[in-house]
Image (tube, rainbow, N blue to C red):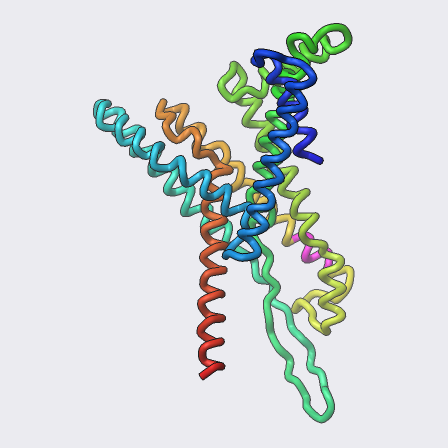
Amino acid sequence: GWSVIQSIGLSLWAQRFAVEPGAFFVFETVLALTAGSMFVMWLSELITERGIGNGASLLIFVNIVAVLPRTLGQTIELAQTGGRETVGKVIVLLLVFLVMIVGIVFVQEGSRRIPIITARRQVGKRLYRERKNYLPLRLNQGGVMPIIFASAVLILPTSLAGITSGENSNGLLAPINQVLIQIANYLNPNGQTPWVYVAVYLVLILFFSYFYASLIINPVDMSQNLKKMGASIPGIRPGRATSEYIERVLNRLTLLGAIFLGLVAVVPTAVESATGVTTFRGLGATSLLILVGVAIDTAKQIQTYVISQRYEGMVKQ
């Protein structure tokens, strides 16, 4: 459904470049893009079912990794052909990306462990002791999704302006097209108002971080589940007080995660603009987060698979 909507918009925008524009061109383009999307979805489901890791994430991961050799080659070539100043700028850019990767690893793996205590309970004649455990809350609940949604919203005015321009901008669409063009110019990172782009980008990342965290974790449901399990947070009453405490902790964690995502999204672009080295332009914040996140998740799944195979071998012996 969504692929059909996107392909219709793309085909309407691409009509101006077609040799024979018209309804048949739109139909062909929509059919090709939708069929391609369905094939990729089928392939990703097949990888998920019979392979290791998430199929869709691995396909995106491979697509990003395929660009890395060319990017590194262009960067090395730039350092070899340029002077000392260029070499220094390249080193600064590489260091920034390395620091970002290390930071992403810490944030993706970082969590706040809330201590919980399970009350004593008696089953038959056996008395189970009070047990201490932890409730982990991740620092970055949304992963890469807040940046993806924020980027999509920023690109939307440009996409709509392209669809409503040219032959489609006659009549009622003309004033709408002009407004969309003005908004797109304001939100252009390489335009005259890059600070507007940065400010809107950060606000959108913050909004979608809280939005996505609210979808993943419900403090009320979590407190009710703890109450049913006979568990509680030390110093916090069960019920409403527990849900409010979890919500406060979650809001603080989400704020820290959103600030970090904003830095990951803005800092590499700012350093590229300051140094003038643009060979890493294709490797943005979203790509870095996907690379690190997929690599960590796949490594964990491989480790789990290896451990399960060892236990299976021990049981057979």
Which corner quadrant holds the N terminus? top right
Q: Is residue 227 left or right of residue 258?
A: right
Residue 49: image location, x then y, percent:
57, 56
Quadrant in the rendering for residue 114: bottom right
Quadrant in the rendering for residue 124: bottom right
Tell me what residue is drawn at x 45 percent, y 63 percent: 303
Tell me what residue is drawn at x 67 percent, y 14 percent: 22
Which corner quadrant holds the C terminus? bottom left
Q: Is residue 280 above or below residue 47?
A: above
Q: Is residue 264 above or below residue 163?
A: below
Tell me what residue is drawn at x 34 percent, y 38 percent: 95
Q: Nearer the viewer, residue 121 or 105?
A: 105
Magenta-drawn stretch, dominant element (helix, strand or loop): helix
246 in the magenta segment? yes
Q: Is residue 174 left or right of residue 201?
A: right
Q: Is residue 86 left or right of residue 160?
A: left
Outermost residue to the top: 171
Residue 8: image location, x then y, percent:
67, 24
Residue 141: image location, x then y, percent:
60, 49
- The total number of labels drawn is 0
Tell me what residue is drawn at x 68 percent, y 91 percent: 126
Q: Which residues are magenta?
A: 243-248
Q: Is residue 131 above or below residue 216?
A: below
Q: Is residue 74 above or below residue 64?
A: above
Residue 80: image location, x then y, percent:
22, 27
Outermost residue to the bottom: 125
283 in the magenta segment? no
Q: Nearer the viewer, residue 81 or 218?
A: 81
